[in-house]
Amino acid sequence: MTTQRTSWALAREAAGLILTAFGLLGVLVALGALHWAAGLCAALAGLLTTGVLMRPKPDAPPWAHAVRAAACIAGYGGLTGCAFALSTPLGWIGVSVAVVLVGLGLTTREHEGEGAS
């Protein structure tokens, strides 16, 4: 048995998505009116958050994982670029945090070394 949504439920879903999109656009425009970097940082933070929260299943096609990686790289790289534009030390903090995260990703995990003895 399949359940189908009624036309009212679909209309409500569409209206909710449209209102969300316009609300986010309003926030980005308002932040951009305050300062260009504020609006750009908010948009890039949203892109980075989307990439972090988007978790494809392990058996998902390779392009799904590539899209997630691209969103994370574009978001973090853009935020680091904005940080360099605002203040050089802030940019270097962003680069250093990325290096730390890569280093943590490369360290040996406990469960990988247990069976090696």
Image (cartoon, helix red, strand yellow):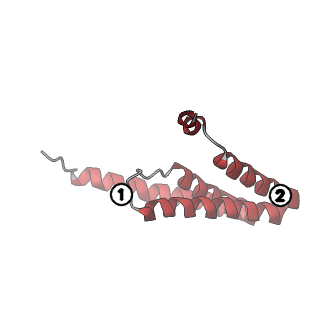
Q: Position of residue 34 (x, y in %)?
A: 74, 61
Judged left or right of residue 79, residue 112 is: left
Q: Earlier in the sequence, mark 2 or mark 1?
A: 1
Front: mark 2 or 1: 2
- Residue 16, x across and y down, in percent: 41, 53
* Badge count: 2
Location of residue 51 (image quadrant)? bottom right
Numbered label attached to residue 14: 1
Q: Is residue 70 above or below residue 90?
A: below
Name the kind of residue labelled 2 in the image. Trp
Question: 98 or 74: nearer the eye?
Answer: 98
Viewer-side residue, 112 vs 71: 112
What's the residue at 52%, 49% (across, down)?
Answer: 53
Secondary structure category for the residue under label 2: helix
Residue at x 64% of width, y 55% of height: 45
Disc number for residue 92: 2
Real-space Cα separation, disc 2 to disc 1, in angstroms: 42 Å
